[in-house]
Image (cartoon, rainbow, N blue to C red):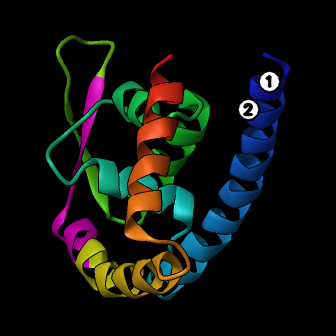
Amino acid sequence: MAEADDLLTALVDHVFALAGRFTEAGDAITGPEDLSAARWLVLGALQDGPLSPAEIARRRGVARQSIRESVARLERSGHLSRTDGTDQRTFLVALTSRGREALARIEPRRRAWAEETAAAVEVEALRDAVAVLARLRAS
């Protein structure tokens, strides 16, 4: 099992390094919209409909506090709005037209970056990587 332990440690090192690089890329992609990668993640989570900040945090695998901060900034900038939740303690957030329009303008830049970056690896290797990371995330 020592080999599996070493491999997992190496994988974690690469994931942390890539997370930083992906955040930098996300900031560059969203910069023209005066957004950050963190706020873009919130907007993207809302594409299929309203969610609570807690639901966004769970889906994105980040701390609720960072989502709350992003939600507050996105509300102030007009990219999203609050709606009533299931009880008085919760609320949902939803994209506004400004938020949807920002995502639409970001999408071509995201696609170009993804195509360029993915060209460094075979498609089958990417499929395998996604499957492995999904299994590890679920365990």
Q: Name the residue under label 1.
A: 5
Relative image position of residue 105 (x, y in whole percent): 29, 85
Residue density around tag 1, few if under 14, some if 14–19, many if 20 or more, within 10 Å: few
Tell me what residue is drawn at x 20 percent, y 22 percent.
Answer: 85
Question: The residue tagged with tag 2: helix, strand or loop?
Answer: helix
Relative to residue 118, is residue 56 depicted above or below?
above
Foreground: 102 or 117? 117
Q: In this view, does 53 lie to the left or right of 35?
A: left
The 10 Å Cα crowd at callout 2, few under 14, some 14 to 19, many 20 or more, is few
Please state the horizontal and vertical placement of residue 2, each as a whole percent of the image.
Answer: 85, 20
Q: In which quarter of the image is residue 58?
A: top left
- Residue 24 visible in rendering: yes
Which residue shows up at 67% across the image and 71% down it?
A: 24
Q: In which quarter of the image is residue 26?
A: bottom right
Number of callouts: 2
Residue 131's place in the image compared with 37, above or below, is above
Query: Where residue 52 sits: x, y (%)?
Result: 31, 30
What's the amino acid at mark 1? Asp
- Residue nearer the viewer, 79 or 133: 133
Q: Is mark 1 on a helix, strand or loop?
A: helix
Residue 63, position as x, y percentages in the image: 59, 30
- Residue at the spot 40% in from the left edge and 78% down from the top edge: 110
The answer to whether 6 appears left or right of 55 in the picture is right
| Quadrant assignment for the N terminus | top right
Q: In this view, does 117 lie to the left or right of 109?
A: right
Say if residue 34 shows up in the picture. Answer: no
Identify the magenta region.
91-101
Are the residues flagged by discs 2 and 1 in contact, CB closer than 8 Å? yes
Q: What residue type is labelled 2?
A: Leu
Judged left or right of residue 73, residue 54 is left
Residue 46 is covered by the magenta coloring: no
Q: Mark 2 points at which residue?
A: 8
